[in-house]
Image (cartoon, rainbow, N blue to C red):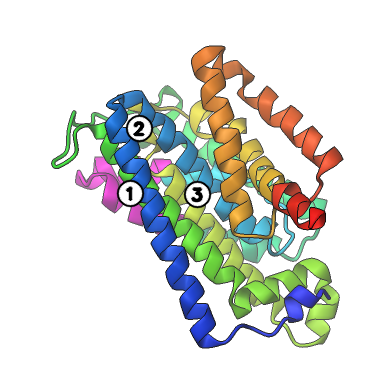
């Protein structure tokens, strides 16, 4: 078991100071991004920012289970799609818009994560990863045959041009995703510095040893899967509003599963900041490639970046800098 997992927690005043510094810094960055993009006056910049922030939420969610606990989840696309189709179903059933859809998606994703964890967390290693991949296949089959949300034809979402006091709907979506990203990173940071995070790190280092010293491993893993599923579904809830149209092929895209794994690994898995760094780096590169060359290069960029970092910096960017000190 690592010294990180057994490290004595910081005193309350020190934790309070660090927490306050984090939230003030996040608020300052968020305001700076908003003012900067509004100054550009280009609606595409909002959508590019939304794209990157969506991956910040997704990578952060994956890291809670995959980075802290060491359980590699290949089901990110399934949880994303569950959130997106929950928002669509709620809109069709009640007429409620995006924000209630995000709340409903979080509840559905959390319950789905809890149920999936209860059924699969007794599996370890590659067997758990295959089980989460099968979850995406099962969910995609259900959605394709569910006519209420469009089935294989897909579903359209008619969104307003503007929402007061925002200048455009793109700006509104960007602000929503910015708040979600800050909240997701804040949750991950709180988990990392809590007893839950230390227990998950003990599970990652040596699960049998953790059980032997009394760590409630199954309970902690269930909490992690529920939290991971909820955040992934929340990341997917605005997707139909972002594109205006959503079909199963796009909702269950391989890109979500690949990026959700690659971004924390490149930034530094097992830390709250690593997924943010990886998501911003890879997301920005993919958006640049989409504008200048073709979106078909996106997975190619992720692939060679992952190969380079696995070979040269297996602990990611943060790990590389720490070893250089």
Residue with the mark numbered 2: 46
Q: Secondary structure at mark 1?
A: helix
Rounded to the nearest angstrom, the CA distance separating label 2 from label 3 is: 16 Å
- At a point 44% along the width and 51% down the height, the residue shown is 181
Rounded to the nearest angstrom, the CA distance separating label 2 from label 1 is: 14 Å
Q: Is residue 146 visible?
A: no
Circle 2 packing at 10 Å, graded few (<14), some (14-19), many (20+), is many
| CB atoms of marks 2 and 3 within 8 Å | no
Rendered image: mark on residue 31: 1
| CB atoms of marks 2 and 1 within 8 Å | no
Q: Secondary structure at mark 3?
A: helix
Question: Between 207 and 274, which is closer to the camera in this rendering?
Answer: 274
Instruction: Tell me which numbered mark, 3 or 1, is placed earlier along the sequence.
Output: 1
Circle 1 packing at 10 Å, graded few (<14), some (14-19), many (20+), is few
Q: Quadrant of the C terminus?
A: bottom right
- At a point 56% along the width and 53% down the height, the residue shown is 60
Span shown in magenta:
84-110
Residue with the mark numbered 3: 57
Question: Between 25 and 50, which is closer to the camera in this rendering?
Answer: 25
Q: Residue furthest top?
A: 293
- At a point 28% along the width and 45% down the height, the residue shown is 98
**Label total for image:** 3
Q: Is residue 310 left or right of residue 266?
A: right
Q: Is residue 1 above or below residue 28?
A: below
């Amino acid at each position: 078991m690592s010294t990180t997992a057994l490290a004595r927690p910081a005193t309350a005043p020190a934790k309070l100071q660090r927490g306050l510094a984090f939230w003030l810094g996040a608020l300052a960055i968020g305001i700076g991004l908003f003012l900067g993009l509004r100054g550009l006056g280009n609606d595409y910049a909002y959508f590019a920012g939304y794209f990157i922030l969506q991956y910040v939420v997704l990578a952060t969610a994956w890291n809670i289970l995959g980075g802290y606990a060491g359980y590699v989840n290949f089901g990110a696309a399934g949880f994303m799609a569950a959130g997106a189709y929950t928002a669509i179903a709620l809109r069709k059933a009640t007429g409620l818009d995006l924000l209630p859809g995000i709340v409903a998606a979080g509840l559905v994703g959390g319950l789905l994560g809890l149920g999936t964890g209860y059924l699969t967390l007794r599996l370890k290693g590659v067997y758990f990863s295959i089980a989460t991949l099968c979850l995406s296949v099962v969910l995609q089959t259900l959605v394709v045959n569910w006519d209420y949300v469009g089935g294989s034809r897909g579903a359209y979402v008619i969104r307003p041009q503007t929402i007061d006091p925002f200048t455009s709907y793109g700006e509104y979506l960007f602000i929503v995703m910015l708040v979600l990203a800050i909240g997701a990173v804040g949750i991950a940071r709180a988990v990392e510095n809590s007893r839950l995070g230390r227990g998950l790190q003990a599970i990652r280092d040596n699960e049998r040893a953790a059980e032997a010293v009394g760590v409630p491993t199954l309970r902690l893993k269930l909490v992690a899967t529920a939290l991971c599923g909820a955040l992934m579904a929340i990341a997917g809830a605005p997707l139909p509003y972002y594109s205006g149209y959503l079909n199963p092929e796009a909702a269950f895209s391989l890109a979500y599963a690949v990026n959700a794994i690659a971004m924390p690994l490149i930034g530094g898995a097992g830390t709250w900041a690593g997924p943010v760094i990886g998501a911003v780096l890879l997301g920005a590169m993919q958006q640049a490639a989409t504008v200048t060359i073709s979106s078909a290069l996106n997975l190619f960029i992720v692939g060679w970046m992952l190969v380079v970092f696995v070979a040269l910096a297996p602990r990611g960017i943060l790990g590389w800098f720490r070893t250089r000190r």
